[in-house]
Amino acid sequence: MSGKESERFKRNLKLKFEILFRIRKSILTFAPHLENKAMSRVCDLTGKKAMKGNNVSHSNRKTKRRFYPNLQEKRFFIPETGEWITLKVSTSAIRTINKIGITEALNRVINNGKI
């Protein structure tokens, strides 16, 4: 990559990251009391969220329950911009990031239109 292309790439990447966190920032501007409270249980990259189901007893009696995704709050370093970002991601998303890299994972999410 030439100098101009790498600068353009860094600028575009930084804009994508700003889009990624605009959602969280906008929530905190309208509801600042939620800053230190638990946020929704949704993965920032995959969009995984809680599912509904039943507890089934030995007698086949059913009671409602929820299945929560295994979410972890994790910091990632972006070498292109030299910044650390904190994301709430599922463990399967962490495995994907380890395999393809954080930059490619964020690019895929943005290209799919999830952000």
Image (cartoon, rainbow, N blue to C red):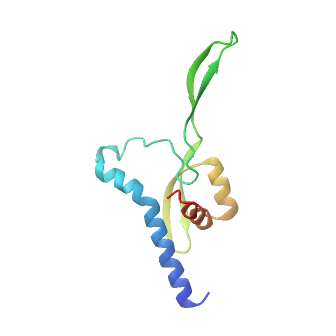
Q: Nearer the viewer, residue 83 or 4?
A: 4
Quarter of the N terminus within the rendering: bottom right
Residue 13 on image: x %, y %? 51, 72
**In terms of depth relative to the viewer, which is nearer, 17 or 87?**
17
Which of 45 and 84 lies nearest the eye of the viewer?
45
Residue lying at 47% horizontally and 72% vertically, measured from the top left = 14
Residue 19, placed above or below residue 45: below
Q: Quadrant of residue 21?
A: bottom left
Q: Is residue 72 above or below residue 64?
A: below
Q: Residue furthest front?
A: 113
Across and down, in percent, residue 17 comes to 47, 66
Q: Is residue 31 left or right of residue 52?
A: left
**x 33%, y 51%: residue:** 28
Q: Looking at the image, which residue is at 41% across and 55% down?
A: 23
Q: Is residue 4 left or right of residue 96?
A: left
Q: Position of residue 106 (x, y in %)?
A: 56, 63
Examine the image and state in which quarter residue 103 appears: bottom right
- Measured as percent of width and height from the top left, residue 31 is found at 30, 46
Q: Residue at x 55, y 65 (%)?
A: 77
